[in-house]
Image (cartoon, coloured by chain):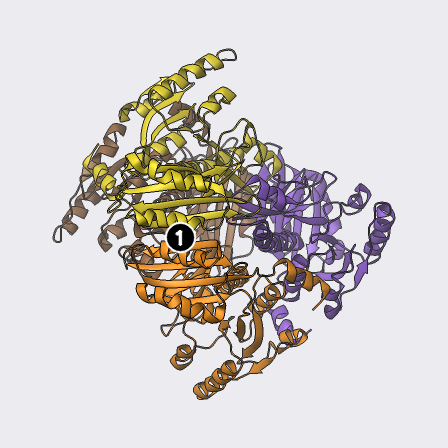
Chain colours: A yellow, B purple, C orange, D brown
Amino acid sequence: MTDRVAKRRDMFAARNTAVLLVSCSDQRGLLAALTDFIYRHGGNIRLAEHHTDFEEGMYFLRLEWSLEGFHLDRSVFSEAFEPLARKFNMTWEARYSDQVLRIAIFVSKYDHCLVDLLYRNQIREIPGEIVMVISNHPDLESVTIPLGIPFHLYPITANNKPEQEEKEIELLKSQSIDLVVLARYMQVLTPRFLQVFPNRIINIHHSFLPAFVGEKPYHQAYRRGVKLIGATSHYVTEDLDEGPIIDQDVCRVSHKDSLPDLIRKGRDLERQVLARGVRLHVLNRVLPYGNKTVVFE
Amino acid sequence: MTDRVAKRRDMFAARNTAVLLVSCSDQRGLLAALTDFIYRHGGNIRLAEHHTDFEEGMYFLRLEWSLEGFHLDRSVFSEAFEPLARKFNMTWEARYSDQVLRIAIFVSKYDHCLVDLLYRNQIREIPGEIVMVISNHPDLESVTIPLGIPFHLYPITANNKPEQEEKEIELLKSQSIDLVVLARYMQVLTPRFLQVFPNRIINIHHSFLPAFVGEKPYHQAYRRGVKLIGATSHYVTEDLDEGPIIDQDVCRVSHKDSLPDLIRKGRDLERQVLARGVRLHVLNRVLPYGNKTVVFE
Amino acid sequence: MTDRVAKRRDMFAARNTAVLLVSCSDQRGLLAALTDFIYRHGGNIRLAEHHTDFEEGMYFLRLEWSLEGFHLDRSVFSEAFEPLARKFNMTWEARYSDQVLRIAIFVSKYDHCLVDLLYRNQIREIPGEIVMVISNHPDLESVTIPLGIPFHLYPITANNKPEQEEKEIELLKSQSIDLVVLARYMQVLTPRFLQVFPNRIINIHHSFLPAFVGEKPYHQAYRRGVKLIGATSHYVTEDLDEGPIIDQDVCRVSHKDSLPDLIRKGRDLERQVLARGVRLHVLNRVLPYGNKTVVFE
Amino acid sequence: MTDRVAKRRDMFAARNTAVLLVSCSDQRGLLAALTDFIYRHGGNIRLAEHHTDFEEGMYFLRLEWSLEGFHLDRSVFSEAFEPLARKFNMTWEARYSDQVLRIAIFVSKYDHCLVDLLYRNQIREIPGEIVMVISNHPDLESVTIPLGIPFHLYPITANNKPEQEEKEIELLKSQSIDLVVLARYMQVLTPRFLQVFPNRIINIHHSFLPAFVGEKPYHQAYRRGVKLIGATSHYVTEDLDEGPIIDQDVCRVSHKDSLPDLIRKGRDLERQVLARGVRLHVLNRVLPYGNKTVVFE
C-alpha cells in the first residue's frame, strides 16, 4: 500500500460505531424502546432511520451509534438486548465498524466492473477486504495479480457446474466470505449455491429490470428501440433477475446509438450501479424483505 | 383568445418554412442530390438531419428550409421532386409550417395529461389545433367546455366497442383529424381503428416500456420494488404496448414511496413524456420505421 | 367543486396526524426523550426523521404520529411539552393535519407556475387553501376568475413600492396568510416585507443557483454556453437569490437550443421545482437554518 | 498488451474515414456545395451534421465519409478543396481516422481522473495515444509505471512557474502533443502556455460552471447548501473557469451529505464528464467558437 492510498484510508476511516438492524411487525412504542435501550447504555445515536410498510404491517429500523461512552461490551450485547427483542418478536443483527466484511468477486471476461470495484476498495470508498476473485475464464487474472489478490479459476462446462460450485462454496467458506459480488459473471448459479449465501450475493444486470431479463439485454434494448438504457444491482434469488433490487439507474440513448454505443454507455451505468449496491450493503444500509429492499441512504 | 395568449402565439409563431421527410435504402450521393435540389430552387436550408441505419441499410432525412426565395410552389413541388424520388426509390412527404395539424384527444377519467396538453397548445408550445376531445366517460367534459372545445361521449361496454369506434372514426374523418392522442384513454383500440390511422395515434404508457406492459403499471412497479418509475410515449400498433417508442423518462423512487406516491410522481412524468412525444410529431421530427423511431430533436 | 375533484380530494385526504418540528444543539438522549414523550401519551409514531449537523453541532427532528389514541389535547400540548423543550433548549413547533395552511401567490405576467400550482392544489397534490393571487400587472386576472380566487392588483412603480407593499402586508395579515409563493413575480421585495414573513416566502429562480443570479438567467445561460439549465426554489431573504435552497433541478441543453428553447424547457423545470418546494413546505418537511435547509422527503 | 485488450481494440477499431470540420459565416448553398464536393470525389458520407447560429450568422459543419472509393488523396485534398473554401471564406480542417492523436495528461495528487482516462484509453473507448503524464507532485508516478507511460515531474513553486512551464512546453512540442488534459491538475497555467495550445487544453472543474469558480468548489457548494453538485469539462482560456464548456453533469445531494460525501459523489461526476469531453474532442466532434462550443454528439 502506497502512501497515497494510506492517506486516503485515513480520511475515510470508519468511525468507531455500531449498527443495529431490526425487522419485526409494526407495534406501538418500538422506536421509543429501541432508542431508550441505546441511550440507557451510554450510546450517542448518530443516525436512526426506520420504515413502516403499512400494507404489510412490517417495521424496519437501522440505528447507528457512537461506541465512545457505550458501556455494553459486544460480548454481552446479545444477552442484554434479547429481552427487548423477544418482547417485540424482532429479527435483529448488530454490526461494528471495526469488523471488516470479507468479499469475493466473481467475473468472466469483462473487466470494467472488476477494475472499478478494486479501485473503489483501494481508496476505501467501498470498505471491506476483497479476499479473492473467482472466474470461469482465465482472462482477468492479469488484473488481480499486480494487486496481490488471489485469482481462482473454475471453468464451467455443460456437465461440471455442480462439482465446480461445490469447490467454490468450500473455498468461500474456508475463507469466511461474507459477500459474493457477481461483477458480470456470465453463469447462472445453482439453487444450492444460492441457499448457502442468502441475501449475500449481489449481481449487476445490464438493464432496468424488469425490462430485458435474461441474455443480451443491450441487444434486446437495441432491437426494441428504447430511448433509455439502464442497469440494476440486486440480490440473487432462484428466480433469474427477480431478486430484491438495491439500486437502478438509466441513461438516455437515441437512434444515433449503435449497439456498441449502448454497450459503451452501459459500462458506466453498470460500474456505478454495482458499486453503489455493494457500498450500501457493506455499510449495512440494505434490509431485504420479500423481493424488495429497504435502503437507508 | 386573450391578449396574453395572443402575444405568446406571436412569440412562438412558426417561421415560414417547409419540411421534407425522406426514407429510402442507403445509397451514395443522397444528401448531395437532396440538398442540391432545394438549393437549385432558391431554398435556404435551415436544418438538415439524417440518419443511416447501417444494419438495415436504411436512410432517413429531414430537411427544413426557409420558403423566402424558394421559387417552387407547393402545387408543383411533387411534380418537380418526383424524378429524384423515383431515382432513389424514396418514400417522402413535404409539409409546410402554415399547415395546421388537426388533433383529437381521447381521454377517460384522469385529467392531468389533458389539462397539460390543452395548456401547452394554448401557449403554442405544441402547435396544431385541438379540434375535439373524445371520451368513454362524461367526467372530463367540464375541462373542455370553458375552452370551447367539443367533447364527444362514446361509452364503451363489453359489446358495443366496434360500433362505437365506427362512429368515432366517422367523426374523426369528417373533421379531417391528422393525429389522435390517447391521453390516459383506458380502452384498447381495435385493429380496425388502428388501420385507419397508421402511425397517427400516440399513447402514453405509465411505465418505462418494455417493463410493466398492460394494466396498472404503477401497481406492478410497487410490487416489484423498483427504484425508478417511468413513462413512455409511443405510436399505437396492434401489439399492445409494443409500438415504436418516441420518448421515455424516469424518476427515482424508494421504499418510502407508497403506491399513491408513485402515482403522484408518475403524473409529472406522463405529462412531460406525452407532451414531448406529441410536440416532436407535430413538428415533423419523428420518422417511425419497423417498431423503432428516428427522432430528430 | 366537481365530483371528479371531490373524489381526488378524498383519495389524498390528509390522515389525522400531528407533526413536531424541533431544532436544538446536539445532545445525548434527544431522540429517546422525544419518542418516549409521544409514546407515553399514546401516540403511534408513523415517521421519525432527524439530522445532526456535526460541524455546527445542531440537531433537527421531525416526528409525525397518529392522533388516534393520543390523549394529549392540542390545547394542552404546549404546557405538557415545555418542560422537555426547556431541558434541551429546543426551538419547536407542533402542527396538525387538519390545520389548513393559507397561501397567497404573487405573480406578474407569466402564467405557467400559477396555472400549475392552482391545478396541483385542486387535485390536493399540494394541500392548503390558495386564498388570493396578488400581482403588479392585470394580465393574469383571467386565470383566477373562473376558479373564484380573488385577484388583487398592486401596480409597482419606481416610487410607490413601499406604500404598495404596506397595503399588501395589511391584506395578507387580515387574511391570516401563512405562506407567500412568488410564482415568477418580477419585483424584488423590500426588507420590511421580508421581515414580516421570515421563512414564509418561497421564490422560484430560473437557474441552478448560485449560477446566474439576478436578471434574465436564461439569457445569461445562453450567452455562457452551458450544457445544462436549471431552476431553484428557495426561501427569500434580504440577499437576493441567496436564501436557503429547498429544491433544484436541471435539464440538458445543447448548441441546438435557441434562447426560446431554453425558456420553453425551463418552464417545465420551474413548474416542478416550485411545486415540489411548496409541497414540502406545506407538509412541514422543510427546516431552514442559516442559509441552508434540512428537507425530510 | 494482453489478448483481452487486443480483442477490445479490434472491436472498437476506428473505421477508415475522414472528417471535415468547417466554420464560416452563414451563406446559401453551403451544405449543397460541401456534400457535392465529397460526392464528386467518390466519398460516401456517413454523417453530416451542421449548426447555424442565426444570431451570430455563423455556420458550422462536420462531415464524415468513408475513404473506400474516395479518390482524392490526402496529400492533394487541400489543393482540391481550397477553391471552395475560399469562395465561402471557410475556416476548415480535415482529419483522418488513422491519424492517432497524441495526448499528455497533467495531474497533481488526485488519481481518480487519471486512472479512469488510462482505463478508457486502454479499452479504446477514448482513442489516441497517451504519450506522457506530467505532474507537479511525485505521488502518481506509481500509477503510470506499470503501464510503461513516462511520468515527468516539474515541481511548481511561487517563483519557478514560468521556467518550469517553458520546459514542459519544450517537452510537449518535442513529442508533438496534440492535446493536453488537465486531470485535476491543481495549478493555474500561464497565458504563455495557453497561447501555445489554443483550444487544445481540456480541464475538469468540479462544479457546474459558472457556479463555484475558483478554489474548493465542493467546500463552496457545501456551505451554500445546494441540492445538486456538478462537474464541467471545458477548454482552458486566460479567464479562469470561463473557457468554452464541452460537457456538464450533476447529481443530487441532500442535507445528509457531508463534505466527504460531496467529494465522493463528485469523483464519479468528474471522471465521466472529463472522459466524455476528451472523447468528443478526440473524435473531432467539438467546434469551439467564442466562449461556446458546438458539440456534434
- Secondary element type, mark 1: loop
Residue at 35 percent of width and 47 percent of height = A37
Chain letter of the residue beneath label 1 in the structure image: D
Residue at 33 percent of width and 32 percent of height = A101
- Whole-percent x and y of residue D123? 39, 31
| D43 versus B37 height, above or below | above
Q: Amino acid at mark 1?
A: Val
Q: Is residue C6 left or right of residue C45?
A: right
Specify the quadrant of the image occupied by residue C131: bottom right
Q: Nearer the viewer, residue A258 or A237?
A: A237
Q: Is residue B247 left or right of residue C255?
A: right
Q: Is residue B151 among what the camera can see?
A: yes
- Whole-percent x and y of residue B291? 66, 38
- Whole-percent x and y of residue B33? 62, 44
Q: How many marks on residues?
A: 1
Residue extending farthest to the left is D159
Q: Is residue D247 among what the camera can see?
A: no
| C200 versus D285 height, above or below | below
Specify the quadrant of the image occupied by residue C148: bottom right
| D51 versus D44 height, above or below | below
Name the residue carrying label 1.
D253
Q: Identify the image quadrant of the N terminus of chain A.
A: top left
Q: Is residue C25 left or right of residue D4?
A: left
Q: Nearer the viewer, residue C115 or C3?
A: C3
Residue at 71 percent of width and 66 percent of height = C2
- Whole-percent x and y of residue D138? 18, 39
Specify the quadrant of the image occupied by residue B189: top right
